Image: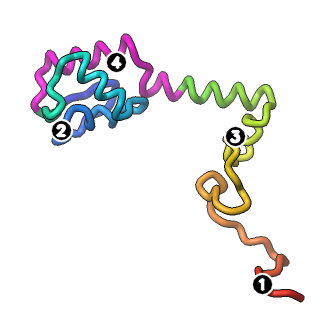
Amino acid sequence: MARIAGVDLPLNKRVEYGLTAIYGIGLHTAQKIVAVIGIDPSKKIKDLTDDEVTKIRKLLESDYKVEGGLRAEIASDVKRLIDIGCYRGTRHKVGLPARGQRTRTNARTRKGKKKTVAGKPKAGIKK
């Protein structure tokens, strides 16, 4: 079983897709890692030798910030924005989109489940 950066990689996937299970590694980065180490990209993770897994682990530790370290850095960046009271920080604090998206419609992912406001007339009905 290949365990890298505290994550059990899916055994039946190709190496470049399996590496994306690690937080902070996308497909492009995974392809770079595979190219640098010289592993056949079509190889499955279950077919990797212990030596290849060790090379991947060492490369990630030395050149990339992944998993816990990356999560901590992102959390501290958001906390800094909130502490200095900038616009982006207040948007994070209130739980609204921070990058200029519209919120009148859409934005349900950040705003959460729809809350109905009592006393507001329904669209198209006039009193």
Disc with the residue nearer the chain's start (2 vs 1): 2
Front-lying residue, 100 or 59: 100
Q: Residues within 10 Å of mark 4 (few under 14, many from 20)?
A: some
* Circle 1 residue: 124
- Using the numbered discs, state the Cα–Cα distance from disc 3 to disc 4 in whole angstroms: 30 Å
Q: Measured from the top left, where is residue 104 in percent x and y? A: 73, 60
- Determine the image quadrant of residue 60: top left
Disc with the residue nearer the chain's start (3 vs 4): 4
Which residue is at a point 28% across and 18% down the rendered structure image?
57
Amino acid carrying label 1: it is Gly
- In the rendered structure, which segment of residues is drawn in magenta? 47-71
Q: Measured from the top left, where is residue 19 in percent x and y? A: 29, 32
* Circle 2 residue: 11
Label 2: which secondary element: loop
Please say whether residue 39 is one of the residues in the magenta stretch.
no
Which residue is at a point 19% across and 37% down the rendered structure image?
14
Are the residues flagged by discs 4 and 1 in contact, CB closer than 8 Å? no
Disc with the residue nearer the chain's start (4 vs 1): 4
Q: Residue furthest top?
A: 62
Are the residues flagged by discs 3 and 4 in contact, CB closer than 8 Å? no
The tag on residue 92 is: 3
Q: Determine whether 1 is above or below 98 in the image.
A: above
Judged by its main secondary structure, the magenta piece is helix
* Circle 4 residue: 60
- Using the numbered discs, state the Cα–Cα distance from disc 3 to disc 2 in whole angstroms: 37 Å
Amino acid carrying label 2: it is Leu
